[in-house]
Image (cartoon, rainbow, N blue to C red):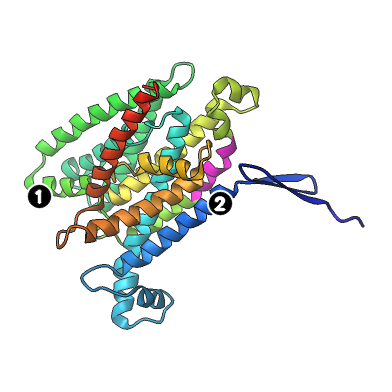
Amino acid sequence: MNASKRTAKSGTRGVTLRTAGLSLRLDVRGAVVGLLLIAVALVMSVVLIGTGDFPIAPADVMRTLLGDGTVAQDFIVNELRLPRVLVGLLVGAALGMGGAIFQSISRNPLGSPDVIGLGQGAAAGALTAIVLVKGDPNVVATGAVLGGVLTGLAVYALAWRQGVHGYRLVLVGIGTSATFTSVNGYLLTQAHQEDAARAVMWLTGSLNGRDWDQVWPLLAVCAVLMPVALGQSRNLRMLEMGDDSAYALGVRVERTRMVLMGAAVLLVASATAAAGPVAFVALVAPQLARRLTRSPGPNLLPAAWMGAALLVTADWAAQRAFGADQLPVGVLTGMLGGAYLLWLLVTERRAGRI
């Protein structure tokens, strides 16, 4: 019996492997960048678990995670800090992938959930649950998801005109974001002092107090929706070339766009429900991942890994960089992301794209 032939062809962008009629193209640089981002996220997770009023050395953290810690270490690591870190990783990954999908669909680096109003819409849902319903954390999380989903549907419907053009999506999203910002301000003025303080804390975006109740729902959402998005990554790459080109290549454009936008909206809304509106991770992570991989495609997995690494690193910095004052992670990402947004706007203007 003849052995199947295997060949490997090197290229400037990667390596193409062929065996028994199948072809697989491996982007070596993208794979290396992805592995490095995973390593950074895991290392910073261990460091973050060991950070706090009761510091634990990284080696002790690893021993405790493997079941060889003391009773006190086991409680602090596995019950108090590990859920917070897992929520941070999942939120960062969901925001990174959701941002990459929106930027690819809109073919615009400004086409981020932060810019087009999904965060503000989710915040409006959460504030409604806090101020008007007086709901518990589960009701607030449900309100945030519903607010994000309804906002996504509204933006898509308003931007639709025989298809969804990238700049029209961004412009409609900016208007929607401004509208919900006003709504959220009004809701805050109608809240009692206790509810207003609770709402403001939620709006900053924070991982403080997160436990296993937030881990499992977000993990389930990511486990279902991320494979759906990855399964459409080839079609998403075709969409980046324009609707006409995608049609010519056999892509069902509107169906693909709706599936991807639905997955991205649910990922972002679920992340917001778990940690509040953590600003600018969805904007920054896909762009940094694209610059590191030097790949023109959607870079969904690198963007997710970049988002996870960014968020746990930012949470560690928010706890350590300001002395005894621990900032919510959303405050730090908002400051850094705002500076990045200004730089991006200047860059896009100089390139003549805005």
Find disc 1 in the rendering and name its residue.
194
The magenta stretch spans which residues? 224-234
The residue under the point 21% across, 58% down is 321
Q: Decide whether residue 228 is among the magenta residues.
A: yes
Quadrant of residue 353 in the image? Answer: top left
Q: What residue is drawn where x is 51% and y is 56%? A: 35
Instruction: Assess whether residue 270 is covered by the magenta stretch.
Output: no
Q: Position of residue 309 (x, y in %)?
A: 39, 54
Q: CA distance from mark 1 to mark 2?
A: 49 Å
Quadrant, the C terminus: top left
Between 108 and 8, the one nearer to me in the picture: 8
Q: Could you tell me which residue is drawn at 59 percent across and 25 percent down?
A: 246
- For mark 1, give the secondary structure: helix
Q: What is the residue that sits farthest to the top in this orientation?
A: 162
> Which of disc 2 and disc 1 is earlier in sequence?
2
Can residue 40 be seen in the rendering of this structure? yes
Q: Main secondary structure of the magenta part?
A: helix
SS type, badge 2: helix
Using the rendered view, name the quadrant where residue 83 is placed. Answer: bottom left
- Specify whether 254 is left or right of 143: right
**Which is more foreground, mark 1 or mark 2?**
2
